[in-house]
Amino acid sequence: MTNEQLIAHLTSAYPDANVKQGNQYPEITVSHDKAHALMVHLKSDASLAFDYLVCESGVDYPAFIQVVYHLESTMHRHFIVVKTNTENRETATLETVSDIWPTAEFHECEIYDLLGVTFNNHPGLRRYFLDDTWGHPLRKDFKDDIHVVER
């Protein structure tokens, strides 16, 4: 599918989502409660077949944390960016996509460690880089009085 065809397909399938052409790939922004169902559809729909999670990362905003997924269809050679926001920053929680793409297990542990997003139903969510005495250093409000790291 071309980018225009992907946008048209997703706009008709998800009228509540924000679908647009990004700088490079089509982007779809969906609410956190519909994100997992969208991801299942993106992988299982044969015309889309997004079988490869290229990257999953997080962005800290004042009211929420956004998780961004870069997906590729190795069969059709098209790409898409999916964005979803946590309900708030204090109890930042999303549903895991590791049941769809096992590579998400590592990405989600990294997001949990550095931004503090909890992924429900993750098979082994834990901190990889820092111990529990640290906060979440990629949050904009992170302060580290011992090491004098401040954002």
Image (tube, rainbow, N blue to C red):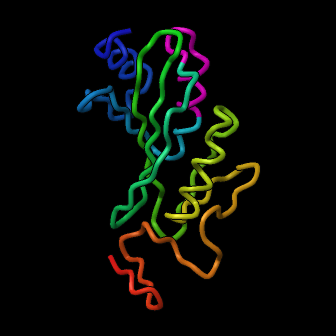
Q: Locate the C terminus by quadrant.
A: bottom left
The residue depicted at 36 percent of the width and 65 percent of the height is 63
Whole-percent x and y of residue 96? 63, 45
Residue 77 is drawn in which quadrant?
A: top left
Residue 141 is drawn in which quadrant?
A: bottom left
The residue depicted at 57 percent of the width and 64 percent of the height is 113
- In the picture, measured across the screen, residue 75 lies left or right of residue 84, that is right
Residue placed furthest toward the right: 123
Residue placed furthest toward the left: 23
The relative height of residue 122 versus residue 88 in the rendered view (above or below) is above
The residue depicted at 71 percent of the width and 49 percent of the height is 122
Whole-percent x and y of residue 59? 39, 55
Whole-percent x and y of residue 42? 53, 23
Residue placed furthest toward the bottom: 145
Magenta segment: 37-49
Whole-percent x and y of residue 98? 66, 40
The relative height of residue 109 versus residue 48 in the rendered view (above or below) is below
